[in-house]
Image (cartoon, rainbow, N blue to C red):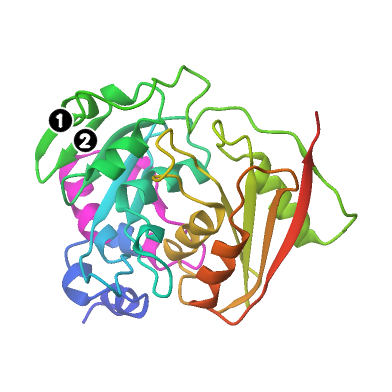
Amino acid sequence: MAQDWIDAARSGMGLKIARKLDADILETLVRPQFTGYFEHKFCREEPAREKLITLAREFAVVPISGFQVGALAIGKSGNAYLGANMEFTGVPLHAGLHAEQSAVINAWMHGEPAVEALYVSEIPCGHCRQFLLELHAAEELPIRVRGVQKNLAELMPEPFGRRRAKGQGLLDSSPSEVVKIHPDDGNQTQRAINAASRSYAPYSKSPEGFIIETINGQHFAGRIAESFAFNPSVPAVTTALNQMNLSAQRKVSISSCTQARLATALTQSTAFSEALMRGICNVPVKSVLMESAH
């Protein structure tokens, strides 16, 4: 048995999947620094992208449905960002994250200014189509499912909401200016505030950030990504869990969690974050209050 197959198995991926991947992709996948994406040199051709879709499905966390969905977002840089659906026990079904959301958020968290194509193992549901409308020029987004390509306008001919202008979409909007209310020099606190400042919250005007720290000192940031239809919005805690799940650290235990939110927010997800994390680890969620810098 080849060493790279053994390494792939150690990372939690089945050997059947490992055998389908190129050695350089496997080498990237099993590195401790892997954060859920592959550089453009690995994914220029369609066959390589199709293989990565198969790989993405392996990251799905589906304790309720058992139905794995994988997605791949191709960024403006040419890099490929994995995405997979996540389900959580102990909270309502709508708390789950869809694979298309996962891939786009992964690209967003890595600083991509645009997604130029989306590959999915299953046809996107209405929830995901609505979420994708938050991208600038969303109607032109090519979506490829099992070799068939359509754009979002074909999948959603009568969209709900308004088009996002350039510089105002999920991936390319400007950061918010927020400051903490209670003095706290903790590094974790500042990380949560930094995450909140990059939130996409055009509807509630209530940025929030979430930081997960693992026992080996790794940090995973999350921030809210809102949708015009509200329900497809993704809270900061889910974004952070998504980034951890798509990384090489996905099975490492969590040691601390910190959430930053506006004290005057019209909406806030503290109770949801606490309920969600209780089903994953026995670590309390530290809450940090912020105010707008304006």
- 165 w.r.t. 291: above or below: above
Under tag 1, what secondary structure? strand
Quarter of the image holding residue 88? Answer: bottom left
Give the residue at mark 1. Answer: 150
x and y percent of residue 247 in the render? 45, 63
Amino acid type, residue under disc 2 in the picture: Ile
* Numbered range of the magenta stretch: 27-55
Residue 248's spot in the image, x, y percent?
46, 67
Q: Nearer the viewer, residue 7 or 168?
A: 168
Residue under the image location 62 percent in, 60 percent down: 270
Q: Quadrant of the N terminus?
A: bottom left
Q: Quadrant of residue 147?
A: top left
Whole-angstrom CA distance, mark 1 to mark 2, is 5 Å
Report which residue position mark 2 lands on.
143
- Residue drawn at (21%, 44%), measured in percent from left and top? 124
Query: Above or below — where is 186 with respect to 98?
Result: below
